[in-house]
């Protein structure tokens, strides 16, 4: 009869570790992204996210299962949108654009912070398996955060980029386009599965990771004299 210890020894720990190294950064990136949407809306006068308990670091309040799977598989995904009532803003379209930008902006800041912390820890962690795991975790967080930020800037509803671009339109056209934004996600998923979006965005994500990595290394060197 197989004992519990035999089952534990038979587990593929390498696969489990690699899965965690993808899931944990993805959850962090999504949570920060949505939280910052809600915080921006609150700062601009809309308390909808607050009343619906979305101003939280609890990832369970933000995760959308399909979007999380997409982020893990394609390195491009999404979360459960934070509820926003643009009519609570003094300038509705401008407020919506700023709220939308807060998400991608937070991802770029998170990537820079993760890579800077990586620089701080590298000399202490280098050479051990645990240290390499932490370094990989930081790298994955930065890469996924950059990919999520770039992906959300696509100007196709309901991506954040569409809310920024459409804010330049007349009110009537803006409201008409926003009414049909739920259908845009079907187009986004189709483009991802076809590789039309996922391929180029992975290239852009990789390029930005390299630039952010070099900038973080330069910043770390500057701080340390």
Image (cartoon, rainbow, N blue to C red):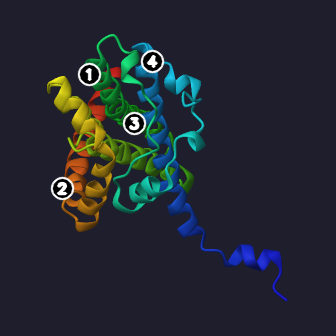
- Near mark 2 (Cα within 10 A), the count class, few <14, some 14-19 or many ≥20, is few
Tell me if residue 32 comes above or below residue 192 in the rendering. Answer: above
Which residue is located at x 50 percent, y 19 percent?
A: 47
Choose the circle earlier in sequence order: 1 or 3.
1
Choose the circle earlier in sequence order: 4 or 1.
4
Q: Residue 168: image x %, image y %?
A: 15, 25
Q: Nearer the viewer, mark 3 or mark 4?
A: 4
Tell which of 208 and 134 is nearer to you.
208
- Near mark 1 (Cα within 10 A), the count class, few <14, some 14-19 or many ≥20, is many
Choose the circle earlier in sequence order: 2 or 4.
4
Q: Mark 4 and mark 3 in contact (Cβ < 8 Å)?
A: no
Tell me if residue 39 comes above or below residue 205 in the rendering. Answer: above
In the image: residue 206, left or right of residue 112: left
Alpha-carbon distance for marks 4 and 1? Answer: 13 Å
Q: Disc 2 designates what residue? A: 200
Q: Residue 152: image x %, image y %?
A: 29, 42
Label ID, residue 51:
none
- Which residue ends up furthest to the bottom in the rendered image? 1
Q: Disc 1 designates what residue? A: 93
Alpha-carbon distance for marks 3 and 4? Answer: 38 Å
Tell which of 169 and 101 is nearer to you.
169
**Residue 220 visible in the displayed image:** no
Dot 1 falls on a residue whose secondary structure is helix
Choose the circle earlier in sequence order: 3 or 2.
3
Q: Nearer the viewer, mark 2 or mark 1?
A: 1
């Amino acid at each position: 009869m197989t004992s519990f210890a035999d089952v534990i020894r038979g587990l593929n720990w390498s696969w489990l570790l690699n899965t965690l190294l993808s899931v944990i950064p993805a959850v962090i990136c999504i949570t920060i992204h949505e939280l910052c949407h809600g915080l921006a809306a609150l700062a601009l006068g809309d308390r909808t996210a607050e009343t619906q308990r979305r101003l939280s670091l609890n990832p369970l309040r933000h995760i959308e299962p399909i979007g999380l799977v997409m982020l893990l598989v394609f390195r491009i995904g999404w979360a459960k949108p934070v509820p926003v009532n643009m009519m609570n803003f003094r300038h509705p379209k401008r407020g919506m654009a700023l709220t939308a930008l807060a998400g991608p902006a937070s991802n770029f800041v998170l990537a820079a912070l993760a890579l800077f912390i990586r620089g701080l820890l590298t000399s202490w962690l280098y050479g051990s398996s645990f240290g390499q795991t932490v370094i990989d975790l930081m790298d994955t967080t930065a890469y996924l955060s950059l990919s999520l930020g770039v992906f959300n800037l696509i100007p196709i509803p309901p991506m954040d980029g569409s809310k920024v671009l459409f804010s330049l339109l007349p009110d009537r056209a803006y409201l008409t386009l926003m009414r049909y934004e739920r259908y845009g996600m079907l187009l986004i998923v189709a483009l991802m599965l076809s590789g039309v979006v996922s391929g180029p965005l992975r290239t852009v994500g990789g390029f930005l990771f390299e630039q952010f990595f070099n900038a973080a290394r330069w910043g770390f060197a500057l701080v340390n004299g």
